[in-house]
RNA sequence: GGCCCCAUAGUCUAGCGGUUAGGACGUUGCCCUCUCACGGCAGUAACACGGGUUCGAAUCCCGUUGGGGCUGCCA
């Protein structure tokens, strides 16, 4: 069997968006499923709109998603001469022709056709120019493009689409004599794409639905150049919540933006692969699962609506599955320059460990431990009225401070294994350290817990009635990790300081 | 307008001639509980419509409606 070779061919006229990422993932998964190769080609023939910034974004985003290409990246802008030579060949074989019509003239033709209720196609003025006329115009340096001469007289173009598993039939009368080389000598998409795909021996072209109507044009070029045809698979579009094609209007659409907002690449990959593709009732797919199970026949024919809720669910799923040191690292990677980095110590670790089940993004996770990062807490007035504190509470806080004072210092010693974790590559060793860290935390928290419970019962208090005031005093928030965990993370001294400050604030 | 494609709950989907139409997200209720989550349990909600074909249709065919795409010297 022939090796499967696929490609992703974005144009650097925008950031890598969700739709492009899915197409890339499909192509990657398909090739890898068959042990084939996946290539990346930058289609930068639109010199007006292509930028290096977008190009870098696309490459980086793909890398972040783990969609790794084989071989070197191809740039169409480096291959203009190749396209030109093929255009020359088509000209010589009279499968293409020079067109000297001015843009103004074409615009006029167009409006006349539309006014008469006709299809706005090229009128064919230059389709059958005689040699002398062409020579004359060329010698005069008259601006021109090269058009492909579409065979008509009732002919039609047929190709099989692998997603629908059926033939798509388009009458050639519907297809214009499209431009293959622009006035400035740069080839157009439909021309360059065919030459590159053919020359790089791409076997399967998996791309968006928006290319179906281009396919007959491209097949004509394949045939006119005697290239071997690849197979085509057109994936339906991704729609926004309003049913319209997904665009910037719908909020975050670039991969990069999702990264910044604290999504994990695993979550995005998993979400994207399930958007339009299924494998029975399975929902969770790692990259290797994707490669293992991916196929074209399980791709849905209909358009899919992008749903952030489900992405968030997947993201929280993957956040929960990561170890907390790793999460700290990821949070620091995406933090704003103005934010201070999270420390890789055992206290931060314990908080992340506790909060990671309560958030859906890394950004939220960072925010959730904000009370720990802040030196000085702000207490919300509204929250105070809600608490409705009395003299009894002030008394309780006093007692609580006594309890804190009585805690042994050494339980708060920082037994951070961070040094050992820096720059080591042995996963099982890391796992050991991780487990040890976790059990240290658990042991300590247990000891705080039993001491605290004894303190409560001695005074005939219950957790239920006292938890909220402690929570607010120590964090300034109504929602926080469990009390014992806060005490552990903050440490004795900070807890006492915060209780003192809070007591002063309320009295 | 013309051409092409699509149609199972709010969303992603399973189904491929005979199912109590399955799963997941969301949502609702309950349990757990120091808050919020997590977790567990239970519930909610769908075959767009109309004709055929067939003993039998979500499934096959035709039409209607609705949606999407293309109709560039963008890709």
Image: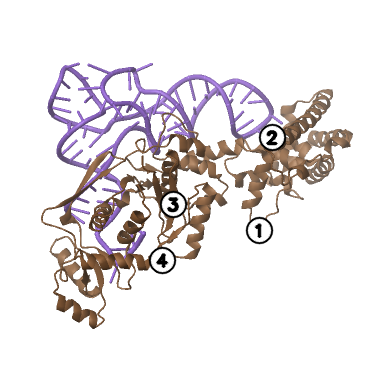
Chain colours: A brown, B purple
Q: Residue A77, which numbered label?
A: 4
Marks 3 and 2, Cα distance to the nearest angstrom?
A: 34 Å
> Do tag 3 and tag 2 residues touch (Cβ < 8 Å)?
no
Tell me if A4 is positioned left or right of A386 in this view. Answer: left
Instruction: Give the mark, 3 or 2, whose residue is nearer the N terminus.
Output: 3
In front: label 3 or label 1: 3
* Chain name for mark 2: A
**Can you see residue A33?**
yes
Q: Which secondary structure, mark 2?
A: helix
In front: label 4 or label 1: 4
* Chain name for mark 4: A
> Do tag 2 and tag 1 residues touch (Cβ < 8 Å)?
no
* Chain name for mark 1: A
Marks 3 and 1, Cα distance to the nearest angstrom?
A: 35 Å
> Do tag 4 and tag 3 residues touch (Cβ < 8 Å)?
no
Tell me if A121 is positioned left or right of A7 in this view. Answer: left
Marks 2 and 4, Cα distance to the nearest angstrom?
A: 47 Å
Residues packed near mark 1 inside 10 Å, few (<14), some (14 to 19) or many (20 plus) = few
> Do tag 4 and tag 1 residues touch (Cβ < 8 Å)?
no
Instruction: Give the mark, 2 or 4, whose residue is nearer the N terminus.
Output: 4
- Marks 3 & 1 on one chain: yes
Q: Which secondary structure, mark 1?
A: loop
Residue sitting nearer the eye, A211 or A181: A181
The x and y percentages for residue A278 are 40, 34
Instruction: Give the mark, 3 or 1, whose residue is nearer the N terminus.
Output: 3
The residue at 67%/38% (across/down) is: A427
Marks 4 and 1, Cα distance to the nearest angstrom?
A: 36 Å
Marks 4 and 3, Cα distance to the nearest angstrom?
A: 17 Å
Residue that mark 3 sits on: A39
């Amino acid at each position: 069997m022939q090796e499967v070779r696929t490609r992703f061919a974005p144009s650097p006229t925008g950031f890598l968006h969700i739709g492009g990422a899915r197409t890339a993932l499909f192509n990657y998964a398909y090739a890898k499923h068959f042990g084939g190769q996946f290539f990346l080609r930058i289609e930068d023939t639109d010199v007006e709109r292509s930028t290096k910034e977008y190009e870098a974004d696309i490459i980086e985003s793909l890398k972040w998603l783990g969609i790794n290409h084989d071989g070197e990246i191809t740039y169409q802008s480096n291959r203009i001469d190749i396209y030109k030579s093929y255009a020359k060949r088509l000209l010589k074989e009279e499968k293409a022709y020079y067109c000297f019509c001015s843009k103004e003239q074409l615009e006029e033709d167009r409006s006349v056709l539309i006014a008469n209720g006709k299809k706005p196609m090229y009128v064919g003025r230059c389709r059958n120019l005689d040699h002398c006329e062409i020579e004359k115009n060329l010698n005069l340096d008259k601006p021109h493009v090269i058009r492909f001469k579409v065979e008509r007289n009732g002919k039609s173009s047929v190709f099989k689409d692998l997603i629908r598993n059926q033939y798509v039939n388009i009458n050639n009368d519907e297809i214009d004599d499209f431009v293959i080389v622009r006035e400035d000598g740069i080839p157009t998409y439909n021309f360059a794409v065919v030459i590159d795909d053919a020359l790089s021996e791409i076997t399967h072209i998996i791309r968006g639905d928006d290319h179906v109507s281009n396919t007959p044009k491209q097949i004509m070029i394949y045939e006119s150049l005697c290239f071997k045809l690849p197979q085509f698979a057109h994936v339906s579009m991704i729609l926004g919540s309003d049913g319209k094609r997904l665009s910037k209007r719908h909020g975050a659409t670039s991969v990069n933006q999702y990264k910044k907002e604290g999504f994990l690449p695993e979550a995005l990959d998993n979400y994207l692969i399930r958007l339009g593709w299924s494998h029975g009732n399975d929902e969770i797919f790692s990259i290797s699962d994707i490669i293992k199970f991916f196929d074209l026949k399980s791709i849905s024919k209909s358009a899919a609506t992008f749903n952030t809720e489900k992405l968030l669910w997947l993201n929280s799923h993957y956040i929960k599955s990561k170890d907390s040191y790793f999460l700290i690292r990821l949070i620091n990677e995406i933090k704003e320059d103005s934010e201070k980095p999270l420390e890789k110590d055992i206290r931060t670790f314990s908080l992340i460990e506790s909060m990671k089940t309560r958030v859906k993004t890394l950004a939220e996770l960072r925010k959730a431990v904000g009370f720990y990062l802040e030196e000085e807490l702000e207490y919300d007035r509204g929250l105070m009225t809600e608490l409705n504190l009395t003299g009894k509470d002030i008394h309780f806080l006093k007692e609580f401070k006594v309890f804190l004072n009585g805690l042994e210092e050494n339980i708060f010693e920082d037994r951070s294994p961070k040094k050992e974790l820096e720059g080591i590559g042995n996963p099982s060793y890391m796992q050991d350290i991780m487990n040890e860290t976790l059990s240290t935390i658990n042991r300590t928290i247990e000891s705080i817990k039993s001491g605290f419970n004894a303190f409560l019962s001695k005074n005939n208090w219950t957790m239920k009635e006292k938890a909220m005031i402690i929570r607010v005093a120590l964090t300034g928030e109504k929602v926080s990790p469990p009390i014992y965990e806060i005490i552990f993370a903050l440490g004795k001294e900070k807890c006492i300081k915060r209780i003192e400050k809070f007591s002063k604030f309320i009295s």
